[in-house]
Structure formats: structure tokens, C-alpha cells
């Protein structure tokens, strides 16, 4: 018998999903008014610049691509109450591995070469995430601290390899270019949107399937809800922590491979503007749900891509987009504190006590 769809529950989830965005836009509107502009015109220009026209839409999807995958990478860990803050570093190492296979192996058929590059990124990203996974699973070391520190290791290591060992000598810190057989095809000449977007969608479907229909997905959710209960039912939560961190790192590696094979066609030191950190916001905004992550990443793509049009057409500085992103994170944090610690209830209680004297 088919289960009834609970529209009320879905509506409630969607409402709480978009609430931080609404608050961020309202505060952003106040800032626009203060700066002497019309917020309706500004937001209208932003959405037109991001969504109207084939080229604009493609560029928005291109901006969304890396943060879809980093958002998924973080969501896999978050769902089990593990905090993989090292997605940025795992992505860097994955990107470098893809570039290395891309410029080292020659004469391969295009599809095979692309697959090998992605596999290299997956393996290296997963192995690097194995370090905090083992430290957490075997020795209960705080994974948040370890993964943050390992980001520096990954970024500085790839910097060194790019500047010295594999330096292309072209005046900026980059490795040798990858072979054309390792390129991910683009959809049109006027946009950088490439097949990395399709790979990101496939990854979202796989993660959704894992969460929904596999034993691993059930265990991830069980550990995330109550680790003591999960242990009591016989789950080996220590081993699962290692597996979850490795899966998260593998996804981060794919995000890096997409940037090398589809965009830069070589590894460039410092190529990421913070995709790993953006992924954290995307995962929180999407409530660790792959569908929610796709929507949140598309929204961030609109902000990134439409910001320049807003600046050009209305004169509102693009830096406002960064402020809106920061406000979304702030309101998400308030929502998290409210959900986890009853922040608003405690605030109301304090207020009532003060009123009563």
C-alpha cells in the first residue's frame, strides 16, 4: 500500500528551509535602501542576470557545480554527526591527483582518461579523509580540529608541488596542462558549464539512494540521531565513522577533479575561492538532504552569477552578495541553536523572568 504524502510536514520543512534566506534578503534590502538604491530593482537585476537567457542560466549552473559536490561531501558526515571540516583540503588533493593523471598518462581514449583522472581524485580524497576517520574511530580524537588543520597540510603541499616539482614555467603557479583526452566537454562556447555538472547530479542521486535505500544510509542516520542507541543495537560505530569520513573525502575529491578536468585543464595553486566552506553552508541550508542541497547550491549560483549584473545595472556593489551569504549563515546558526538547544525558548524564559522582576 502506497504511503500517504504528508504535505503539511513537507510544507513545514520547506518553510524552515527558506526562512534564513528570507531573513537574509530582508536585511539585505534594508542595506540597499540605506545605500540609496531600490531593493526590488536590485534583486530583479540579480535574478534576471542569473536566470534569463541560455548563457546566463548555464553560467549559474556552472557556479553551482562545485558546491553541489562539496555540499554532498559535508552532508554525508553531518548526517552522522561527524564534522568533516577538511573538504577544502581533500578537494585540493583530489584536484591535484586528477591533474597528475591528466598530464602524465598520454595516448589514452578520452572517456577512459577522464575516468582514470576521476578515480585518482576519488582515491586520494578518500585516503586523505581516512586520517581523521581513523583518529576519530580508533582514538576518539576530535575530527573537527584534525580536519581543519589538515586543510593547511593539503593546500601547502599542493602549493609546493605546483611551484617546484611540477611547475609549468608559465608565469603563475600551475602544473603542466592535462592532455585533451582528459577534458570534460563543455555544453556551449560562451559558458564554462561542462560535464562536471552532470557528474554532480549523478553524485546527488547516488547519495540520495544511499540515504534512502541502503544499510549504510540507515546506519548513518541512526548514528546521527543517537550514537549510544546505535551502539546498543550492535552497530560498530567506530568503523562506521571511518567509512563515513572516507566517503565524504571521496566526494570532495570528485569536486576537485571537476574543476581541473572541466574548467582549468591544469592544477592551479589556490584555485578554490572556498568551495569547501561554501559546501558547509549548502549542506546546512539543504538540511543534509541531496534534493535540498541541489536547491541551495542553485540559489548560491544565482547569488554568485547575478551579483555582477546587479552591480552593473543598478550600482549596488557585488560585495552585498557576500553580506547576504554571511547573513544566511548567521540565521542558519540561530536556527541550529534553536533546534539543538532550544535557544528561542531559553531567550523567552529569560525575558519573562526579567519582566516579572
Image (cartoon, rainbow, N blue to C red):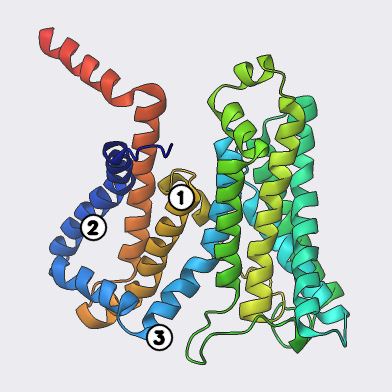
Between discs 1 and 2, the one toward the N terminus: 2
Q: Secondary structure at mark 3?
A: helix
Q: Position of residue 14 (x, y in %)?
A: 31, 46
Of the two numbered discs 1 and 2 in the rendering, the one whose residue sits closer to the viewer: 1
Q: Earlier in the sequence, mark 2 or mark 3?
A: 2
In front here: 323 or 69? 69
Determine whether, in the image, residue 152 is placed left or right of residue 345: right
- Check disc 1 and report its element: helix, strand or loop: helix
Name which quarter of the figure residue 92 lies in.
bottom right
**Which one is nearer the viewer's eye here, 156 or 26?**
26
The Cα–Cα distance between marks 1 and 2, rounded to whole angstroms, is 18 Å
- 182 up-or-down from 338: above or below: below
User: Going 46% across and 50% down the picture, which residue do you hit?
Assistant: 281
The number of numbered discs placed on residues in the rendered structure image is 3
Q: Which residue is mark 2?
A: 28
Q: Residue tagged by mark 1?
A: 281
Q: Residue at x 56, y 52 (%)?
A: 72
- Say whether residue 315 is left or right of residue 238: left
Q: Which is more toward the observer, 182 or 88?
A: 182
| Pointer 3 local density, CA inside 10 Å: few below 14, some 14–19, many at least 20 | some
**Number of residues whose C-alpha sits closer than 10 Å to that of mark 2, classed few (under 14), some (14–19) or many (20 or more):** many
Quarter of the picture containing the C terminus is top left
> First in sequence: mark 3 or mark 1?
3
Residue named by callout 3: 55
Kindly report which numbered mark, 2 or 3, lies closer to the viewer in this rendering: 3
Amino acid at each position: 500500500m502506497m504511503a500517504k504524502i504528508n504535505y503539511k510536514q513537507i510544507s513545514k520543512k520547506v518553510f524552515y528551509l527558506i526562512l534564513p534566506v528570507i531573513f537574509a534578503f530582508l536585511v539585505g534590502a534594508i542595506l540597499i535602501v540605506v545605500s540609496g538604491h531600490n531593493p526590488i530593482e536590485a534583486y530583479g537585476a540579480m535574478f534576471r542576470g542569473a536566470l534569463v537567457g541560455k548563457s546566463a542560466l548555464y553560467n549559474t549552473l556552472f557556479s553551482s557545480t562545485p558546491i553541489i559536490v562539496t555540499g554532498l561531501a559535508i552532508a554525508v558526515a553531518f548526517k552522522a554527526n561527524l564534522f568533516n571540516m577538511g573538504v577544502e583540503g581533500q578537494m585540493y588533493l583530489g584536484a591535484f591527483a586528477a591533474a597528475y593523471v591528466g598530464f602524465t598518462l598520454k595516448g589514452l581514449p578520452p572517456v577512459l582518461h577522464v575516468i582514470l583522472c576521476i578515480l585518482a581524485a576519488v582515491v586520494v580524497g578518500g585516503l586523505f579523509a581516512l586520517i581523521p576517520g581513523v583518529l576519530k574511530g580508533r582514538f576518539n580524537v576530535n575530527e573537527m580540529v584534525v580536519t581543519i588543520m589538515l586543510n593547511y597540510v593539503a593546500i601547502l603541499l599542493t602549493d609546493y608541488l605546483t611551484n617546484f616539482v611540477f611547475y609549468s614555467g608559465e608565469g603563475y603557479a600551475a602544473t603542466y596542462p592535462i592532455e585533451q583526452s582528459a577534458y570534460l566537454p563543455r555544453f556551449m562556447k560562451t559558458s564554462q558549464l561542462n560535464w562536471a555538472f552532470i557528474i554532480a547530479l549523478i553524485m546527488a542521486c547516488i547519495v540520495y539512494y544511499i540515504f534512502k535505500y541502503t544499510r549504510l544510509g540507515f546506519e548513518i542516520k541512526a548514528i546521527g540521531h543517537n550514537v549510544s542507541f546505535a551502539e546498543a543495537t550492535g552497530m560498530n560505530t567506530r568503523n562506521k565513522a571511518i567509512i563515513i569520513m572516507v566517503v565524504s573525502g571521496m566526494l570532495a575529491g570528485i569536486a576537485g577533479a571537476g574543476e581541473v578536468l572541466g574548467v582549468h585543464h591544469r592544477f592551479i595553486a589556490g584555485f578554490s575561492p572556498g568551495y569547501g566552506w561554501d559546501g558547509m553552508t549548502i549542506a546546512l541550508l539543504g538540511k543534509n538532504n541531496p534534493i535540498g542541497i541541489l536547491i541551495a547550491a542553485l540559489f548560491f549560483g544565482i547569488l554568485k552569477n547575478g551579483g555582477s549584473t546587479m552591480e552593473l545595472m543598478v550600482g549596488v556593489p557585488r560585495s552585498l552578495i557576500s553580506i547576504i551569504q554571511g547573513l544566511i549563515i548567521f540565521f542558519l546558526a540561530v536556527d541550529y541553536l534553536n533546534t539543538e538547544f532550544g535557544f528561542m525558548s531559553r531567550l523567552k524564559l529569560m525575558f519573562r523572568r526579567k519582566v516579572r522582576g
